[in-house]
Image (cartoon, grey):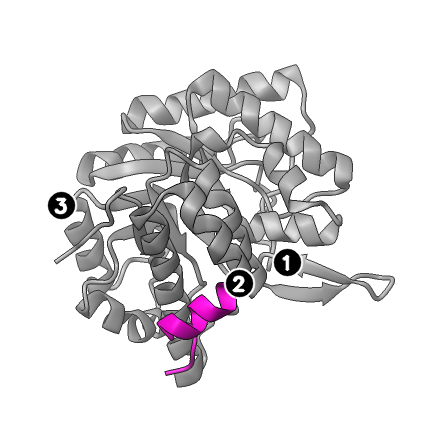
Amino acid sequence: MLSSSKKDVLCGLSLMNSPDFLAASLPLFDDGEVEVLEWSFDVSWENKLEDWASELVSFYSIENKLIGHGVNFSVLSGKWSEAQQEWIEHFRQECSKHSFMHVSEHFGFSRAGNVIQTSPLPVPFSKGALALGVERLKLMSEIAKVPIGLENLGFAFSLDCVKEQADFISQLLEKTDGFLLLDLHNAYCQIANFKVDAEDYFALYPMERVREIHISGGSWSPDKDGNSIRRDTHDHEVPDEVFELLLQVLWRCPNLKAVILERLGNTIRSQDEAARFRSDYLHMKKLIQLFCAESYTDVIPPLVSNRQSIQGNTQVRQHD
């Protein structure tokens, strides 16, 4: 049976259509720990869902606990393409078959083809690009008839680009009455890569519009000067810094509905990594439960300052 906390902030997983995800997450599903399921529906248009994954999608849809997450629409591509027209038609079919709590897409564009290890790229902020984004988000809204949101990027070209993305997203959401999917690992990438203060970063965004939060892991890569760049690769455990950011933002998000743990399929390579995946999820859920059970001001400061003691008490971040 699915359960939820007092303030109805649901905790869930991003569904991956891979055997390693099934093996790692099955104990969580069996124990009723997964309160909501996020599904990147457009990924399955090219790679048919396994029967077990399809059954999960159907179950959470019937329970009205299914979240839709698009990857390939490319909201801000300048030219309307045949691929986007096909995406819209497939999206229309998905919305007729499934009951979504809400649906999100990525800010930016991603129409460069099948590029390995790429990510959506930012678009220069202009009146034309803003109008284009508004038009396409409204089209999604007309089809889905549920709230439509945008996810903040993990990639930027410069510190000015970091700020411009926030302004662009804020205006898109204001003009479409959309919600913000706040990806905290994406935020961590920009905070680490451009040495941005976390408080300053979140002040750029309309936090009252946050309806969903993502947490995930990633990796470090060297640049041409030998410095480390944080990348949103979704292929490792959640770093402590991302849990810190979760604690830092919860009180700012009065309209938060769900917090989702993401990890790409075929990246959980051992029993130990599977155990850590479950541990990350349970730790995330414990923090949300503690937050929802108390007032913002009474709970969050102690959680931030005493995270290690809470981690030890709950024993959910330890290896199984």
Residue 296 horizontal/vertical position (percent) = 41, 42
Report the front residue among 116 and 169: 169
Give the magenta range: 306-320
Farthest residue in the right direction? 225
Residue 289 point in image, percent of width and height: 31, 54
Q: Disc 2 and disc 3: Cα gap in Å? A: 30 Å
N-terminal of the two: label 1 or label 2? Answer: 2
**In this view of the protein, can residue 40 be seen by the observer?**
no
Q: Relative to residue 281, is residue 134 depicted above or below?
A: above
Residue 181, placed above or below residue 286: above
| Distance (Cα) linking label 3 and label 1 | 36 Å
Residue beneath label 1, please?
Answer: 231
Q: Earlier in the sequence, mark 2 or mark 3?
A: 3
* Mark 3 Cα-neighbour bin, 10 Å: few <14, some 14–19, many ≥20: few
User: Which of the 4 image quadrants contains residue 47?
Assistant: bottom left
Please report the residue visible at 19 percent of the width from the left and 63 percent of the height from the top: 32
Q: Which of pointers 3 and 1 lies earlier in the amino acid sequence?
A: 3
What residue sits right under mark 2 in the picture?
217
Q: Which residue is mark 3?
A: 62
Report the side of 56 relative to 190 (left or right). Answer: left
Q: Quadrant of the N terminus?
A: bottom left
Q: Is residue 146 above or below residue 73?
A: above
In the image, 18: left or right of 81? Answer: left
Label 1 element class: strand
**Amino acid type of the residue that numbered disc 2 sits on in the rendered structure:** Gly
Q: Nearer the viewer, residue 290 or 51?
A: 290
Crowdedness of circle 2 by 10 Å Cα count: few (<14), some, many (20+)? Answer: many
- Residue 176 visible somewhere in the drawing: yes
Magenta stretch contains residue 46: no
The kind of residue on which mark 3 rests is Ile
The disc labelled 1 sits on which kind of residue? Arg
Residue 307 part of the magenta segment:
yes
